[in-house]
């Protein structure tokens, strides 16, 4: 058993600072362990007691009669480090540190947290600043929190991991009211050692867990998260994440809460997409989606039968599903025929929602209706609506729904229209995803559909086209901004085609270089100090070769009037035409690290924010997904009779850009190709301008 | 008292088809009337009883001892019309018809519904197919529905109007569980006579109603709705609408782009924006927003203090607010100073969320904190977070919140983090908008902000620039598609500047027309049968005048090879350059009628759906709002150093287009200007192409 397994399934638990006074918080861990039936050994440690809760109490860690798998550390922040050191020396598997006053409490706290981590050595730490861990599968509560004391906590197959203890408690009480159960509950707190990724990684191997729900404030080790998410995708175990700190103001408060630094939300969004994470967009979805997925039914298509005894709610749910891209087709003729054979007076069977009117109160009939819809080739899922008639007689509706479950492996959801918490709780408790918001039904279906088709995410194991010797080594390059021709040489070294061009020093050289090219040319000022050449008059297009010297002289005057930047010379470049202009850029997020951005060049990107982001290293599928994600990629796919762009070459260029970022590592400060021309099919791509800044 | 007032506040109610058997549904209306304390006269009508519920029962309407203000008609669909005729003849104010089997039941039902309406004469009808009406303010229940039977229905200032009875019941039971009360509840059913607009119109004058919530399936009389919404805006009484049927695809029109861009829901969205309706985007918002607005507090800015004793939930709420465009700034120095003077140990007072930790459990301290935040110049609203510590001792949190209400007129919202329905219900019942979804807090603030700034919507009383004699009369024009020059003459007749152009019959005439113009020209095929000239090779741009005859002949060959459409001749047109290309189109929605669409011309509109829609007649403010709504209008506003476009001329053109639609009325089938060039400031706009189809 490794240390994390010992943490989740300890045979022995030491409680450091346990109290014998039932009024005190420090008495709770032992009370909870016993209440939920923990059968292992419990070692209270407290020099002030001989016994605690009727158990022999030990004066210190050194006096323990055995090595505990887990220690719950209840002492104050100033004493934690010593205790943890002793526990580690004794061979304890893991310590759960509840005290606050560490990473979230300024520089002094951060120093203390580093000392804590050092003191733990090979022992794992959950926390500090955590409310602990509950293994509901095995009935083991490792916590002092009142939030975990509640009665009626159900066992289920959803594991919940939260960086905030308060939110864990909130979700738990909400889930309990809805009849939703859990396998494991973990608050990771300040994550001095074990972080969300470590916990998720463990849960991926937990047979009792079918879906992992995560409340995330920020990732300290994005690479590790990515690795774990890829493993989850491979195993087909979905991870659902709600990320707080999406807005600037939220990010500020997340800092104050656990010391996490929230990054730009767009980068998180990119990461989640890339590694197959299902994102909860609202807080409620962090329960709704796991509830849907834990039913372990695969949604194979987008056609949904809505069966109702109350017309209004049926329309409402069907409309929400429609908004999310699901169809509610009328039953096919043979299905309608079978329904008609049930002889339902007043029922509307030839449409969808299928309004069964009063048959909704006859369990035998209702069971048959669900069976027929399950068996119909027209539908991939069934949603049953519970109306007000169900409130007084919940079993009339619940029983046929539950009876139907075994008859099909198609998803079955329930929407409860009136306030009826008893029905919601009863059905959820029996494994039927049951919702009270029409939008939740649509969200649930979408998540089920995604979970069914998300396998294969995570082909991002490493740089795709990187081979030894490809690419220029960073060591050759100067620090600071490169000029345009140096930048493009760097791109070209990684395999990105660049415009044919020549750097020159004088107008005369420019003209003779131009005359050696075909057709009119583009003339640019060459300077590593000018990032935006157009703004200082440093770009002229469509110049006749014979005019180049004159135009060069004019440009020199204009540029020098606009800026004091050092002018290194001129760039004479072929005119690239007939392509679609994209921008391919690099950004370093303070938390998540390097990111790659693709967008349409020119004003459209800025006006419509039509961009796609992914984190390097990219796989081919990532690059293709980026292209598909931007709406303007329609322009490359034969939109309105336009020629198709060379998408293969674009994919290669994106991968080469990713390779460059990996190879240059921390030396890369900025990099952008703008524009990157995507030429018609077979003609490749061409970087016409670009900049690079190195450290 | 008019008939609708008599319906809401009857002094006498006849119940047609009342039963004396308490087990029957038809016994309920009288039971409900009495249970809720109705003090007027009740007339049971049923030939089978002498007395009903201890009251004298009348054999028929003719036997009634007085004229009822309202009749509740419980008889079956086949008998309703006769009863209604008798009630109308007796001078009854209004009949509430519960039976189904009318407009919702095929052609036969629709015929029956027309007969019902005819039989009613001047008497008003609510329904048929309604569950009735409840006036909670005055304790009058006019319904047989079990959904309205519930205990604990609170009186409040929200009026709820629903086209679905089932949804009314659902909302009611949900509201009751949250402590939310109502003034009036109305299910309008099939709307044979009284529709949502009539009911809203009445509620605008109801002092007990401060906000009207509407569940809408579809508008039968959009003009009437618009009129009522304008009156609501004038009175400052907000209307909140949830519209179902959003996922239905709009009817596609044959030849113009406008139809494809204007989906059914987009037109509703346009209408709502235009008349100042606050739209509930989710079903839950149809309660959340009215709850927020019924507090009658004005949100004057976007700065929100979040005060919490549980860090995680504070971050979550602040983040949701941030996503909705609200700020959570740190307290200013003087506010922080006042908070520090309270001597809250461990509290984080220099940031926001303001984490008061355990002070959240000391009512005196907590009251002072809220008071200081209310008085702070840094904040426009305060959100109080209730954590798990509040569940056990609800009054510790609720009392200081309630005590604080009278001290300020700034909005105060509560977010309850754990499952705690008792606290939610208690606070809502006391008039403090209290929510359980973090997103609801943000939605509530947004709605309050909009309600405070929405006055002045509805300057759409009539055509703005329409004067007698302006515009060509439709009578002069042929039916069917106009050709390009006829279309533009029509536009020009309403004051929209069009490109300078000449229609010619032969290549030679084309050349001489071109030679009389300045510069190169645009050459087009002229044909009323060709909607998309480019696709058949019927447009050539930048042609030298001397080349025109040759190009004409070539075009003739190309076009005739591509289509068998009749070619009427050619159009020689000035080249318009230097402007931004827009599309200005007309679309007739089957439900809501004429709509005007504005978008950027070219591919951008189709790729990004960056369009704005409004319903004619437009006021100047509507036209300006359309321009502001499209993102691409940045291109007209000096984006990245571009010249500013002539926005005044664009507004005038939009208004002229609106006038044209009003004048042509039903004769207009399609109309589109594409492109409409917006030239730099002072140079106006120019319609370069367009099409019109008349009936």
Image (tube, coloured by chain):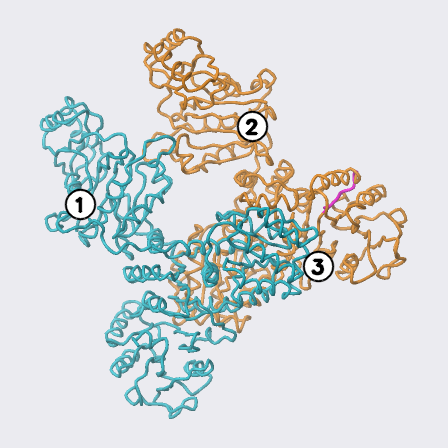
Chain colours: A orange, B cyan
Left or right relative to B103: residue B289: right
* Residue closer to the observer: B509 or B352: B352
Residue at the outermost bottom position? B50
Q: Which residue is mark 3?
A: A146
Q: Quadrant of residue B461?
A: bottom left
Count of marks, rendered view: 3
Left or right relative to A384: residue A234: right
Q: Is residue A650 above or below residue B204?
A: above
**Disc 1/disc 3 C-alpha distance (Å):** 73 Å
Q: Which residues are magenta?
A: A121-128
Q: Chain of mark 2?
A: A
Q: Secondary structure at mark 2?
A: loop
Q: Chain of mark 1?
A: B
Q: Are marks 1 and 3 on the same chain?
A: no
Q: Which residue is mark 1?
A: B494
Q: Is residue B473 above or below residue A657?
A: below
**Disc 2/disc 1 C-alpha distance (Å):** 62 Å
Q: Determine crowd level at label 2: few under 14, some 14-19, many 20+ residues with C-alpha closer than 10 A.
A: some
Residue A70 can be seen, yes or no:
yes
In contact (CB < 8 Å): disc 2 and disc 1:
no
Please state which of the two labelled residues, at mark 1 or mark 3, is closer to the viewer.
Answer: 1
Identified at 16% across, 22% down, the residue is B547
Q: Which residue is mark 2?
A: A464
Residue A605 falls within the magenta-colored stretch:
no
Q: From the image, which quarter does the N terminus of chain B lie in?
A: bottom left
Q: Determine crowd level at label 3: few under 14, some 14-19, many 20+ residues with C-alpha closer than 10 A.
A: some
Please state which of the two labelled residues, at mark 3 or mark 2, is closer to the viewer.
Answer: 3
């Amino acid at each position: 058993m490794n240390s994390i397994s010992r943490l989740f399934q300890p045979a022995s638990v030491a409680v450091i600072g346990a109290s014998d006074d039932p009024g005190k918080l420090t008495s709770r861990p032992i009370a909870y362990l016993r209440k939920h039936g923990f059968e292992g050994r419990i070692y209270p440690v407290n020099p002030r007691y001989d016994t605690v809760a009727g158990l022999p109490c030990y004066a210190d860690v050194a006096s323990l009669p055995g090595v505990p798998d887990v220690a719950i550390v209840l002492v104050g922040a100033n004493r934690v480090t010593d205790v943890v050191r002793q526990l580690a020396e004794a061979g304890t598997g893991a310590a759960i540190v509840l005290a606050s006053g560490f990473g979230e409490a300024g520089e002094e706290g951060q120093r203390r947290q580093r000392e804590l981590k050092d003191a733990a050595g090979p022992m794992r730490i959950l926390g500090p600043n955590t409310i602990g861990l509950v293994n509901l599968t095995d009935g083991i509560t490792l916590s002092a929190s009142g939030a975990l004391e509640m009665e009626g906590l159900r066992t289920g197959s959803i594991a919940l991991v939260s960086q905030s203890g308060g939110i864990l408690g909130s979700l738990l009480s909400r889930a309990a009211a809805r009849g939703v159960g859990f396998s494991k509950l973990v608050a990771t707190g300040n994550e001095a050692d074990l972080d969300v990724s470590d916990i998720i990684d463990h849960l991926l191997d937990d047979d009792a867990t079918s879906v992992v729900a995560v409340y995330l404030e920020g990732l300290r080790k994005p690479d590790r998260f990515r690795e774990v998410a890829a493993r989850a995708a491979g195993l087909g175990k979905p991870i659902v994440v709600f990320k707080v700190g999406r807005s600037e103001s939220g990010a500020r408060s997340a800092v104050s809460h656990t010391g996490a630094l929230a990054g730009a939300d767009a980068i998180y969004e990119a990461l989640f997409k890339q590694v197959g994470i299902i994102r909860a967009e609202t807080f409620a979805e962090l329960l709704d989606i796991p509830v849907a997925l834990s039913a372990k039914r695969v949604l194979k298509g987008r056609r949904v039968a809505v069966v109702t005894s109350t017309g209004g709610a049926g329309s409402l749910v069907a409309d929400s599903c429609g908004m999310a891209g699901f169809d509610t087709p009328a039953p096919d003729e043979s299905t309608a025929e079978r329904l008609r054979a049930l002889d339902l007076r007043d029922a509307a069977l030839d449409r969808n929602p299928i309004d069964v009117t009063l048959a909704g109160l006859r369990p035998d009939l209702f069971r048959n209706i669900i069976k027929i819809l399950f068996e119909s080739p027209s539908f991939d899922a069934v949603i049953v609506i519970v109306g007000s008639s169900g409130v007084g007689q919940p079993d009339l509706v619940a029983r046929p729904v539950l009876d139907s479950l075994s008859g099909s492996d198609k998803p079955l959801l329930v929407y409860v229209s009136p306030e009826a918490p008893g029905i919601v709780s009863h059905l959820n408790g029996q494994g039927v995803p049951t919702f009270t918001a029409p939008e939740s039904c649509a969200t649930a279906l979408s998540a089920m559909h995604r979970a069914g088709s998300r396998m294969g995410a995570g082909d991002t194991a490493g740089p795709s086209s990187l081979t030894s010797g490809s690419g220029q080594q960073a060591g050759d390059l100067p620090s600071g901004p490169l000029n345009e021709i140096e930048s493009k040489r760097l791109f070209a070294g990684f395999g990105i085609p660049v415009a044919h061009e020549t750097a020159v020093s004088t107008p005369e050289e420019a003209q003779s270089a131009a005359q050696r090219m075909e057709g009119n040319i583009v003339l640019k000022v060459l300077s590593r100090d000018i990032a935006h050449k157009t703004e200082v008059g440093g770009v002229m297009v469509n110049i006749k070769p014979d005019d180049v010297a004159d135009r060069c002289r004019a440009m020199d005057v204009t540029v020098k009037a606009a800026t004091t930047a050092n002018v290194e010379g001129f760039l004479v470049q072929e005119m690239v035409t007939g392509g679609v202009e994209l921008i391919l850029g690099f950004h370093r997020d303070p938390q998540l690290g390097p990111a790659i951005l693709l967008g349409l060049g020119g004003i459209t990107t800025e006006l419509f924010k039509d961009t796609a982001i992914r984190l390097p290293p990219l796989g081919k599928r990532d690059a293709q997904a980026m292209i598909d994600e931007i709406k303007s990629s329609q322009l490359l796919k034969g939109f309105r009779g336009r020629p198709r762009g060379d998408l293969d070459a674009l994919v290669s260029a994106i991968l080469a850009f990713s390779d460059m970022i990996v190879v240059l590592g921390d030396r890369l400060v900025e990099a952008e190709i703008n524009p990157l021309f995507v030429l018609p099919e077979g003609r490749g791509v061409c970087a016409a301008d670009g900049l690079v800044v190195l450290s």
